[in-house]
Image: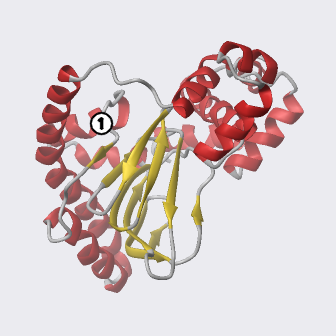
Amino acid sequence: MYHYGKMLILDSKKTTFGTFRETFHAHKEMEFVYVHEGTGQLITDGKTFAIRPGVLLFFQPFQLHRVQIEVTEAAPFIRSLLIFDPQLLEPYMEPYPALKSFYQHLYHHELSMKLIEGIAEEDLLVSQLAYYSSAIQSAPPDEKAELIIHCTVSFLRMLKPIWQERGEREARRVSRYPNRQPHQAETMMQWLDEHYKEEFQLEKMAKALHLSPYHLSRRFKEMTGSTLSDYLQAARVRQACLLLTKTPLSIQEIGIRVGLTNPSYFCQLFKKKMGISPHQFRLIQQRARSGL
């Protein structure tokens, strides 16, 4: 793995042989994950998607997600990662107007396409990650930042036509089959996403979804690998990150708006999930926007 400060994380063919179970989480970085080996599911935006070899996953900043992979010694999870802070790299898109437009689309717009299937390992989009991972690690210190810019620009340039072609194909598919019935777990997550501002009442949720409280809790854990409480906490922290980044609201007011009326508990939960306090998070975002 190559880790360059807060700007970029690049890892080619990272391998996990043991159990791989993420919790629901969100982060400020833009993340791409190419799956070389492994099968499982992605849960994001209240929906589930199948993960298999040849899939490229994409996560926008503060997009709540969870990846579950069935891992054994004989069937490890092998993936390549490209993770970077879009605020820090956005200025380097200025010389490329068409690429900048695509970059801003990925960064700021609501995207219906969460992954791209059928990308071969031999595709330059994938193979360049191994090249740049090696090149950046072996480069002199004064050349590393330049190679990082080259890596992200090159990756996005190669991704752009693939994304556009697959996006058009996906739009045609959805127009033909617009009324897919939601998975039971999706219905549960959608309810939580709609009611995260309220005090959580299991009985109220169970009644709305026509389930017993016990069956609701058990089925959610079976289908997602997380508890209702874990998902709700992650959803609230994700929304708090957005409000801290995009609004001047006070920390206390943001806590209230995400359903956490006790300021002390809000700060405690935020730090547990994000590793820093809400105030520190806001300062980092402000400094990144100002180029400091």
* Quadrant (top left/top right/bottom left/bottom right) for the N terminus: bottom left
Q: Nearer the viewer, residue 57 or 4?
A: 57
Answer with the quarter of the image where residue 139 lies.
bottom left
Q: Give the residue displayed 61% in from the left and 20% down from the top.
A: 191
Q: Nearer the viewer, residue 266 or 49?
A: 49
Residue type, mark 1 in image: Met
Counting other residues with Cα less than 10 Å from the Cα at mark 1, is it few (<14), some (14-19), or many (20 or more)? few
Residue 279 in the image, given as x and y percentages of width and height: 72, 38
SS state under label 1: loop
Q: In the shown orientation, is residue 91 left or right of residue 7?
A: left
Residue 158 in the image, given as x and y percentages of width and height: 14, 54
Residue 74 in the image, given as x and y percentages of width and height: 45, 81
The residue wearing badge 1 is 113
Q: Is residue 250 visible?
A: yes
Answer with the quarter of the image where residue 155 lies.
bottom left
Answer with the quarter of the image where residue 10 lies.
bottom left
Q: Is residue 289 above or below residue 175?
A: below
How many numbered marks, from 0 up? 1
